[in-house]
Amino acid sequence: MVAPEAPLAPNGPRTDRRGRRRTGRALSRSTPLLPAVVLLAVFLIGPIVQAFYGALTNSSLTGSAAQESEFVGLQNFADLFADPVFPKSVLLTTAFLVFSAIIGQNVLGLGLALLLRTGSRPVRVGVSTVVVGAWIMPEIVASFAAYAFFAEEGTLNSILGAVGIAGPSWLYSFPMLSVILANVWRGTAFSMLVYSAAINDVPPEITESAEVDGATGWQRLIRITIPMIRRSISTNLMLTTLQTLSVFTLIYVMTGGGPGTNSSTLPVLAYQEAFSFSQLGFGTAIAVILLLVGALFSIIYLRALKPEVD
Amino acid sequence: MRKRALAALAVVASAALILSGCSGASGDSSSTIKVAYQKYGTFVQLDSLMKKVKKEFEAANKGITVQLQPIQAAEGDYYTKLALQNKSSSTAPDVMYEDTFQVKSDVAAGYLAPLDSYIAKWNEWDQFLGNAKQAGLGDDGKTYGISMGTDTRALWYNRQLFQKAGLDVPWKPKTWDEVLSAAKTIKQKLPGVIPFNVYSGKAQGEAATMQGFEMLLYGTKDTLYDTNGKKWVAGSKGFSDSLQFVQEVYQGGLGPTPQQALDKNIGTTISSEWLPKGKLAISLDGSWQSGTWLSTGTAPWPEWNDVMGQAPMPTQNGQSPGATSMSGGWTLAMGSKSKNKSAAWNFIKLALNKENSMGYDIAASQIAVRKDVAADPAYQKANPSFEFFSSIVPVTNFRPATQDYPKISNAITVAMEAVMTGQQSPKQAAADYDQTLTSIVGDKNITK
């Protein structure tokens, strides 16, 4: 439709006019993008900007600050860093992230994907149905299912009781372990699907030739498969990390962040401060920190695994 | 040209989309008034009252529709949902069920409308007791809420379980130690029975602060707030002693297990299951308990008055006045964003006339705040526990009436949860509370 542009003479006499015409044309050509850009700005950047601003106010659900919130600068962050609950919450969030997403979901998902490749068809269908089942369930249903499993008189303790073991009160005595296991159960399917797709894309000739060269199964995995699915690993790590950082329903339903603050990860803490304790500004400050942590992890993955280089 | 036209169209369309989202169609004409209130667990008496008043109101005011908005949420969540509703003029209710401790805070937030001009023309206002009038005041001295009833708190105990454990009935403990020793006897003699419940922890919200912590603290020599100096009290011995008591109950195995106590539904479980089935021997609880067991309640229990006894909560060491109690209560208030304030006022007036007040006070086991209701023989005979709970009014206390109270109440539940779960000692939890208190009210509003 459009004729390719003739290359410009570096300092031809008409550069100026042509340049201006080009800018004009580029502008008019990008006009149809404007609505999309506006929508993006309003619905994606808008809330982020608002969150950053909200974190700098004393906005509240009740009391005089609800009527006219004041700009308080970095006071919320100062209070937050002075609060002993905050470092504990960061630690819990990190533990939740590392054990349930980075180790649990990723390693288990990759393992399942590798095993399924060699499994027989009925095994494949059976296992993937069971694993994906947890993923299909709406979050709140999965959360209640996990609660029913770990509750004091729940499934787990009934099974343990049947073999003569008196199970502990999981949600109370081991709240983090319970929510980590629940999140692994719920999220593994996603990693498994991503890795299955990626492994299917590894050309069989390469693995076969490695096999002919005498590479063991383990060497093939480390030297061939993993480097070739590096980009999927990076994408998957990023997605599961961001998903896990924002897990709220699962923890809130299972333990409510308790007992005490023993399972209050950052999202639960933010909710509690903003909505249970009416301090919207303070809660937003926690949410902003969560946003920064997520951004930090994304950058690390992008840098460390260099998905763009093949 | 066509591209440009398309682009322009797209811009207009997206702008329209965004703007329509912002404007928020407010379909409420002034011919509808919205009434927001709590309906949760065993608390359904208010719902019945509102349904009745809606019918009467619509019959008397043709053309005005009452839209009832029962909020199904536990107490803490109710305040949050109501506040969120109040924030936007398209969802703000015209009439709302408002806890007295929340009034000053919500007045400061600009959610409530002053009622003085309406009260001035209301000939029934002088029927209300002074305390009840006081409870609806904002910081500016204007009236914002009309009291529906009040309450007191004391120890409910199961006479049958006490007799089985060999304890004296009627029970009248004189100190905290006597309360705990009775609980210990029950633990020893009646395994399987939960000896003693004190509401505690974040999940119970204001119930933990008021029914639990303040019932203890106001029985020590200290208080939360120095009313004369208008300063909050930090680092008091009474505060850590009260936390110590909570710790002894939960860590000493005298209460429900902490996981039961931290369940949001424990209030419902206690009144509809544990007490009627004899699974709990003593509960530090409100005067409204019996409302659930009346034939109009959600868990009728005809024998409740034979089984359940009441004893005043003693002071720490039996010091004068010997017993203590806390009083609160709820009001009906008008939303400041109401588009038809006179209709809203008429609704409040109708809901709290003598007949409706009395019906509600009897059904929900409230202590009447209207003189004509309190004096009515029908009210006096309706519930055998009214006499006891009215008799402790002389020793009762009220919560600090300041707009910071709701936030401080939350800080108290955090301290309680920390000691009941054994995560902190009473001293550490009290120190953390002092720090939170300072950040809420500032150094200059604190006395040590």
Image (tube, coloured by chain):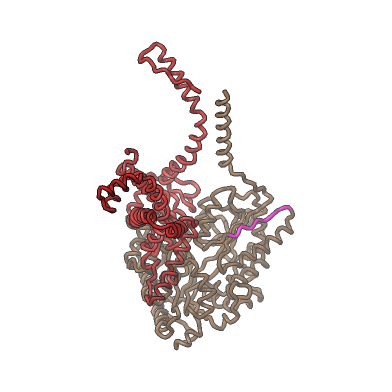
Using the rendered view, name the quadrant where residue A250 is placed: bottom left
**Residue projecting furthest to the front:** A212
Q: State whether residue A120 appears in this view.
A: yes
Q: Position of residue B5 (x, y in %)?
A: 58, 26
Q: Would you say B443 lies left or right of A62 here?
A: left
Residue A151 position in % (x across, y down) = 43, 68
Quick one: B44 or A201, which is closer to the camera?
A201
Instruction: Report the span colored magenta.
Output: B63-70
Image-quadrant location for residue A267: bottom left
Magenta span contains residue A20: no
With respect to residue B183, does B237 lie above or below? above
Q: Residue at x 52, y 70 (%)?
A: B268
Q: Nearer the viewer, residue B109 or A25?
A: A25
Residue at the (52%, 34%) spot, across then down? A35
Which chain is red in the picture? Answer: A
Check residue B69 for magenta coloring: yes
In what quadrant of the picture does the N terminus of chain B appear?
Answer: top right
Image side of residue A184 versus residue B92, left or right: left
Q: Closest to the observer: A293 or B311?
A: A293
Image x and y of residue A102, in percent: 34, 53
Which residue extends farthest top?
A13
Q: Color used for chain B?
A: brown
Residue B125, compared with residue B305, is above or below; it is above
Question: Magenta part mainly helix, strand or loop?
Answer: strand
